[in-house]
Image (cartoon, rainbow, N blue to C red):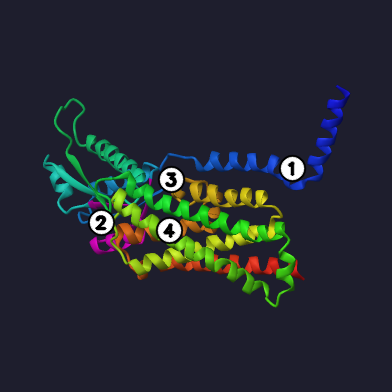
Amino acid sequence: MKKTLAVARKEFRQIVRDRRTLLILLFVPTFVLLLFGYALNFDIRHVRLAVNDSDRSAASRSLVSAFVNSGYFDLIASVDESETTRLMDRNEIRAALVIPSGFSRALATGRLASVQVLINGDNANTATTVMGYALTIVRTESARYVPAAATVQPLISIEPRVWYNPELRSALFLVPGLIAYIAMITAVVSTALSIVREKERGTMEQVRMAPIDAGSFIVGKTIPYFFVSIVSSVGIVVVSMLLFGMPMRGSWPLLFAALSLFLVGALALGLMISTVADTQQVAFQAALLVSFLPTLMLSGFIFPIASMPRFLQLVTYIVPARYFLVALRGIVLKGVGLSICWPDLAALAVFAVAVLALASVRLQRQWA
């Protein structure tokens, strides 16, 4: 027993001295619990709604109020048909309620009144839920115009239309997310191990003595992995089109540009990790932590960002997969051009440049 306690005391002292192991043991479980606890939310809230009200009557305003007061929809704007298309392409709205003229007159005379709900279908799960919300709200509102004892059909009917993914195929929602997920993990892990490998083999000292600055070294490390990653990513896109029927409604050069910016940022993130870690094991664990969880949980891949707590929504702004997914789905599913997706490409470019610069600064300090 004394020998066992002696070994245990020695191990406790070793853990306390090893700050990184202690951080992993204490921080990671808490971080994962908080992340999953707040981000794992299947309730769809704050659906951005636009209204095209051609009737402009008390009955139409009552229907709009029913949507807003349900707590599921946030009214963004009153629009016409052309604005609806523009806002949907820009991903600024998830649904649009279209109320035709004559809506109140039909209700007043006991005739069937139809309304239309246009739904952004690039996220099949969200679209299905939004459709269910809309059907429930319209049925409830319709019951207000029918006496309680009556058995006639509801006076308000709803005609849902799903844009970009009318069949609500889950593959068209999941495959773009998987492309981002696979590309992010492989790019970050591959470069995270590169500089650490130099450290473990002892060749880093030779590199420091060579006539090369940290920036050139970082860029030189990135280029080979970039070409390998871009070939792999394009291959994944092509296979997704052949096997899963993913369409390509936009521009191939624009898709290539989005992939390139995303991969440069991911590779730079891996290089920054490699400047911090001293062993390949630590680098691999850190690479998985910063690529796996954010891409899966905080990019909008599975869980809608609008349903997350406000502080997590702010965190998602530094997750590059958030911008890449919007651009990727816009290009392949909606066929949008540069005029629509340039903000997301700009965000990817800023992330890539910032992380590359940070990795260069860190490496320069180690060389000094």
Front of the two marks 1 and 2: 1
Looking at the rendering, which quadrant does residue 27 occupy?
A: top right
Q: CA distance from mark 3 to mark 1?
A: 31 Å
**Where is 215 relative to 315, above or below?**
below
| Image coordinates for residue 323, horizontal then vertical, percent | 45, 59
* Quarter in which the C terminus is drawn: bottom right
Q: Which residue is mark 2?
A: 52
Q: Is residue 250 left or right of residue 354?
A: left
Residue 233 shows which numbered tag?
4
The stretch in magenta equals 73-98
Q: Nearer the viewer, mark 3 or mark 4?
A: 4
Question: Marks 4 and 3: in contact by CB < 8 Å?
Answer: no
Q: If the image is split into quadrants, where does the N terminus sit? A: top right
**Can residue 19 be found in the magenta stretch?**
no
Comparing marks 3 and 1, which lies closer to the viewer?
1
Q: Is residue 86 magenta?
A: yes
Quickly name the residue at label 3: 302
Numbered tag placed on residue 22 in the rendering: 1
In this rendering, position of residue 79 left or right of residue 259: left
Q: CA distance from mark 4 to mark 1?
A: 36 Å
Mark 3 vs mark 4, CA separation in Å: 20 Å
Sequence-wise first label, 2 or 4: 2
Three-letter code for the amino acid on which mark 3 is drawn: Ile
Q: Is residue 285 visible?
A: yes
Name the front one of labels 2 and 4.
Answer: 4
**SS category of the residue bearing label 4:** helix
Q: Is tag 3's residue or tag 1's residue first in the polypeptide sequence?
A: 1
Find out whether the residues at labels 4 and 1 contact each other: C-beta distance under 8 Å: no
Mark toward the start of the polypeptide (4 vs 1)? 1
